[in-house]
C-alpha cells in the first residue's frame, strides 16, 4: 500500500491508500458513483453494468467475507476501480477462497481505501456523478486526468461487455433468446429454470432471432447511455409484435425507447439493494409485491431512466418511492413489458420473482 489521492473533476480531493491492482501509469479514471449495499460487494464489482465507472461503497466495512467464485456475475469485473473506507484484510467465511484485495489484484482492478466515503457520498449527491481519477500521484496530475475522462454519456459500452458469440444455457420447457447487453449470471440462472436460453451478442439482428421462433426475448441489463444504442432500439422495434419481450434495466430503457419514449441521465443514479418500489397494478400474478399498492425492496444499478409520460400506448406499472422515477412499463399494444430494477436479485428477498412468472404467462399465451 502507498498513499494516494482521489480527485474529482470539480476539484474535490480525498486522501487514501492504494489497494488492489496497480493502475496503468499510476492513475485510474472513470465516472464515480456510489453504491449503498451492505453485502454483495463481489456481485456489484462483477456486474457489467459498471463498465466505465468507479464504484464507491457507502458501507464503511467492505470485504469481511472475502470472495468466492460462485458470486461472480460475469467472467470478470468491468468497473474501472473501487473506493472503500475500510477494506478487510482478514476475511472470515467458509466459502471464501481469497480476500477482496486479492480478488481485485488478480483481476487487475485498482482501488483506494481509507477514503472518507461519507463525505464523498454527500458530495456526489450534491454535485452528481462526476469523472474522477485516483492513484499515488500529485493532485494536479490527477485533476487533469479526471477532467480528461469523458464519462459514460453518449458512449456505447454494451458492445464492449457483450458476449462475442452465441451460447446456450438452461433446460426449461420454453425457448428464450437473451440479448446480452451486459447480462448477469443470476438473470440467466433464473431464466434457465424455465427455459432453454440462447444468449446472443448485443448486435444480433432481429431477423436472426425471429428465425429461431423463440417463445420470448429478454433484453438484459447493461452499462452506459441507452441513447447511444440506436442499433439496439431498431432491433427491439423489429421484435415487437412478433414475440413477447421482457426488458430489465438497460433492456427496459431500450424497450421504452423503441415504443417511442425518451431517457435522461439521473443526477447520481440508483445503485444499491434497498430501493423501495411501489407496484401500481396487479395483472393477476401473486407474490409479496404482486398486488396493487404492494411495495418491493429492490436491487438497482443504473444512471439513466425513462422520462415519465414519454412512452405512448404504455402503462406505468411501478414507481420508485424515493424519487418517483418510472420503474416499470407495460405496452398496451404488444406483448412487452420491462422494469428498471433487477428482479433476479433478492434483497427483499424475493419480492420481484413474480415478474418472471408474468414473462412465462406471456410466452404461454403466445404459443
Image: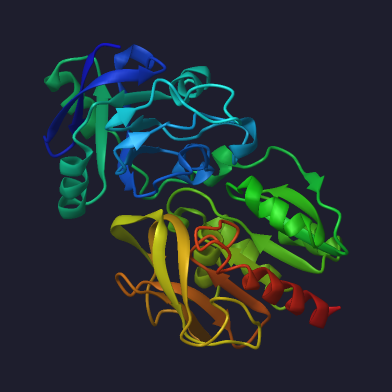
Say how the picture is coloured.
rainbow
Left or right: 271 as drawn, with respect to 169? left
Left or right: 261 as drawn, with respect to 126? right
Q: Which residue is nearer to you in this view: 137 or 117?
A: 117
- In this rendering, the answer to whether 348 lies above or below 77 is below
Give the residue at x 50% y 74%: 328
- In this rendering, the answer to whether 91 lies above or below 355 is above
Give the residue at x 39% y 20%: 89
Left or right: 85 as drawn, with respect to 40? left
Q: How many labels does the image show?
A: 0
Q: Quadrant of residue 288?
A: bottom right
Give the residue at x 46% y 86%: 293
Q: Quadrant of the N terminus?
A: top left
Q: Which residue is nearer to you in this view: 136 or 296?
A: 296
Examine the rendering and report whether any part of residue 191 can be seen: yes
Give how far across and how far down residue 30 sits, in percent: 33, 35
Give how far across and how far down residue 32 sits, in percent: 30, 40
- In this rendering, the answer to whether 218 lies above or below 277 is above
Give the residue at x 48% y 22%: 99
Give how far across and how far down residue 364 sits, in percent: 82, 78
Give how far across and how far down residue 127 sits, in percent: 16, 50
- In this rendering, the answer to whether 332 lies above or below 15 is below
Amino acid at each position: 500500500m502507498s498513499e494516494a489521492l482521489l480527485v474529482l473533476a470539480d476539484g474535490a480531493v480525498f486522501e487514501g491508500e492504494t489497494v488492489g491492482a496497480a493502475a496503468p501509469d499510476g492513475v485510474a479514471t472513470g465516472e464515480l458513483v456510489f453504491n449503498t449495499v451492505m453485502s454483495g460487494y463481489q456481485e456489484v464489482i462483477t456486474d457489467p453494468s459498471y463498465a466505465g465507472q468507479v464504484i464507491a461503497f457507502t458501507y464503511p466495512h467492505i470485504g469481511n467475507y472475502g470472495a468466492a467464485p460462485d458470486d461472480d456475475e460475469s467472467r470478470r469485473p468491468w468497473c474501472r476501480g473501487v473506493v472503500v473506507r475500510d477494506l478487510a484484510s482478514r476475511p472470515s467465511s467458509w466459502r471464501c477462497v481469497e480476500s477482496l484485495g486479492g480478488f481485485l489484484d488478480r483481476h487487475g482492478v485498482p482501488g483506494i481505501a481509507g477514503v472518507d466515503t461519507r463525505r464523498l457520498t454527500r458530495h456526489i449527491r450534491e454535485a452528481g456523478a462526476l469523472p474522477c481519477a485516483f492513484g499515488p500521484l500529485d493532485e494536479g496530475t490527477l485533476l487533469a486526468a479526471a477532467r480528461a475522462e469523458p464519462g459514460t454519456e453518449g458512449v456505447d459500452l454494451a458492445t464492449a461487455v457483450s458476449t462475442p458469440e452465441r451460447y446456450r444455457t438452461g433446460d426449461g420447457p420454453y425457448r428464450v433468446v437473451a440479448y446480452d447487453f451486459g447480462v448477469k449470471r443470476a438473470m440467466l440462472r433464473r431464466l434457465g429454470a424455465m427455459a432453454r436460453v440462447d444468449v446472443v451478442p448485443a448486435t444480433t439482428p432481429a431477423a436472426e432471432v425471429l428465425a429461431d421462433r423463440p417463445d420470448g426475448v429478454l433484453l438484459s441489463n447493461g452499462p452506459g447511455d441507452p441513447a447511444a444504442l440506436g442499433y439496439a432500439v431498431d432491433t427491439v422495434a423489429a421484435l415487437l409484435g412478433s414475440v413477447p419481450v421482457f426488458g430489465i434495466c438497460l433492456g427496459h430503457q431500450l424497450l421504452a425507447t423503441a415504443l417511442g419514449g425518451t431517457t435522461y441521465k439521473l443526477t447520481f443514479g440508483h445503485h444499491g439493494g434497498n430501493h423501495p418500489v411501489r407496484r401500481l397494478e396487479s395483472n393477476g400474478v401473486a407474490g409479496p409485491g404482486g398486488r396493487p399498492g404492494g411495495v418491493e425492496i429492490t436491487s438497482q444499478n443504473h444512471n439513466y431512466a425513462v422520462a415519465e409520460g414519454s412512452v405512448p400506448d404504455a402503462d406505468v406499472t411501478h414507481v420508485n418511492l424515493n424519487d418517483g422515477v418510472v420503474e416499470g412499463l407495460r405496452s398496451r399494444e404488444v406483448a412487452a413489458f420491462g422494469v428498471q430494477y433487477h428482479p433476479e436479485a433478492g434483497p427483499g428477498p424475493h419480492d420481484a420473482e413474480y415478474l418472471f412468472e408474468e414473462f412465462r404467462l406471456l410466452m404461454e399465451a403466445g404459443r
